[in-house]
Amino acid sequence: MKPLSAAALAQAAEAAVVALAMNGDAAAFSELVRRRQSGLRNLLRRLSRDPALADDLAQQAFLKAWRALPKLRSVGAFGAWLRRLALNTWLEHVRGAPPLAEGDPDELAGGAAPSGAEEQLDLDRALAQISPDERLCVVLAYHEGMSHAEISAATTLPLGTVKSHIKRGGERLRALLDGYQTVKESAHAG
Amino acid sequence: MQDELDAKLMQRFAMARAPLPAEPFLGTLSARLHGRRRFAAALPSVLGTIFSGLADGILVPLRLKLTRYVVLGAAAVTLLSVFA
């Protein structure tokens, strides 16, 4: 396949760019990274609560993707495949690393949230308060829009457990976010 | 059947999904990718040098005159250095 210019790659359909990258086109792979990096990094930021770690894991996932791309069965499956790689990278990290202390919102104080992204900080603070498994299931359901069955397959957690984590974690998250909102409103009023 | 999700939470997640700039992430990734490629490209030459060095170390003494004495001398020096 003939290599395309950066401008042509930016305009090309993802399936075409994936096909080029599968044939070893580094510029096409860079274009895929450009398109997908934000979603993948945001997913890992919600899971890890640490922007630097999230970016490092995202890089590891992209490096794995570059090596494994020739084995990808269908160009249309690239997005889900990449997300699975990122998720596996996260799970490998969690299994190999000491668990993060739960319920420490101050950990997020140094986070690289863009200015004005108050919702993002609130959400990360609230996510820090729920258990790691609940967080994993809630993030995959709400951030990634994965079905309960897909989450069960991706995390190897039983479907019933996934459902209960999403229900209980979601309720807790909602209560925490409402609590933050109430505090803010009373601070503004006072 | 669609899995039931809290609409307000979905909205909160959507609001928090701010697009992140590609740089410097892309630059760092590119450097890591090229670093691995350079290493992969250099690997055959590094291995070749190591093996040719080992082969020379073994073969060159055998080509010398009085090889038997040279080999015996080398073995004696090795043993002395081990047990000294």
Image: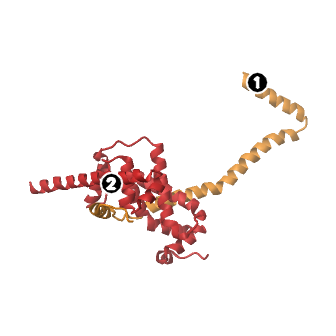
Rate crowding at label 1 as few (under 14), some (14 to 19) or many (20 or more) other CA atoms within 10 Å. Answer: few
Q: A153 or B33: nearer the eye?
A: A153
Residue at 51% from the left image edge and 66% from the top image edge: A78
Residue at 35% from the left image edge and 54% from the top image edge: A166
In-image side of A138 versus A3 (left or right):
left
Q: Which mark is residue B22?
A: none
Residue at 54% from the left image edge and 60% from the top image edge: A65
| Circle 1 chain | B
| Circle 2 chain | A
Asked if badges 2 and 1 are on one and the same chain, I answer no
Please state the horizontal and vertical placement of residue A1, each as a whole percent of the image: 61, 75
Q: A161 or B24: nearer the eye?
A: A161
| Residue at image mark 1 | B80
Q: Residue furthest right?
A: B66
Mark 2 or 1: in front is 2
Please state the horizontal and vertical placement of residue A2, each as a whole percent of the image: 60, 77
Q: A153 or A50: nearer the eye?
A: A153
Number of numbered discs: 2
- Is B69 rendered above or below residue A142? above
Hey, what amino acid is under mark 1?
Leu
| Residue at image mark 2 | A167
Q: Chain letter for orange?
A: B
Rate crowding at label 2 as few (under 14), some (14 to 19) or many (20 or more) other CA atoms within 10 Å. Answer: some
In-image side of A8 versus A122 (left or right):
right
Mark-to-mark CA distance, 2 and 1: 73 Å
Is mark 2 in CB contact (under 8 Å) with mark 1? no
| Residue A50 visible | no
Q: Chain letter for red?
A: A
Please state the horizontal and vertical placement of residue B74, each as a whole percent of the image: 81, 31
Secondary structure of residue under mark 1: helix
